[in-house]
Amino acid sequence: DSTNLGGQGGQSAAVPAGVGGLGTLVVQTVPWTYVAIDGRDTGRTTPILGFSLPAGSHQVQLRTQTGEVHVERVQVQAGQTVRLIRRY
């Protein structure tokens, strides 16, 4: 039998769901904010209706027009959309 399901001496087991691949981040704030992800300025402001990110944990920094900064942590899963909606 040539089928191998990741048992002894075979290939590694399947990667768990949500590991690897891309997910989508949606960010909506009131008032609008500048958005940085993982310390990098995206060059965008809210609303962001679809921003592709690798699966995993990401830090989202939201900066208002007045300089008020809010930091959020999101967990992105491959093939899924994470919504970050805030009112400041």
Image (cartoon, rainbow, N blue to C red):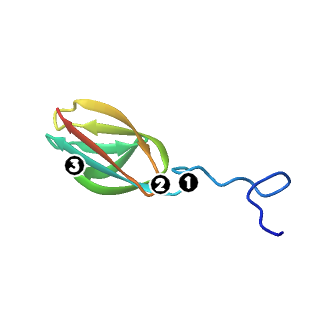
Helix, strand or loop under label 1? loop
Q: Which mark is residue 43?
A: none
- What residue would you read off at disc 1? 20
Q: In the rendered image, which quarter is residue 51 located in?
A: bottom left
Label whose residue precedes the other's in the sequence (3 or 2): 3
Amino acid marked by disc 2:
Ala
Q: Which residue is drawn at 26% across and 53% down?
A: 48
Vertical relation: 44 (above or below) 74 = below
Residue placed furthest toward the left: 31
Q: How crowded is mark 3: few (under 14 residues within 10 Å), some or many (20 or more)?
A: some
Amino acid at dot 3: Thr
Of label 1 and label 2, which has the lower sequence position? 1
Q: In this view, does 39 lie to the left or right of 68?
A: right
**Disc marking residue 46:** 3
Residue 9 coordinates in the image, percent (x, y): 86, 54
- Amino acid carrying mark 1 in the image: Gly
In x, y percent, where is residue 70?
Answer: 28, 31
Number of residues whose C-alpha sits closer than 10 Å to that of mark 1, classed few (under 14), some (14–19) or many (20 or more): some
Q: How crowded is mark 2: few (under 14 residues within 10 Å), some or many (20 or more)?
A: some
The residues bearing labels 1 and 2 have C-alpha atoms spaced at a distance of: 6 Å
88 shown above or below 14: above
Residue at the far front: name it.
Answer: 1
Q: What element carries label 3?
A: loop
Q: Position of residue 61 (x, y in %)?
A: 33, 37
Residue 33 or 1: which is nearer the viewer? Answer: 1
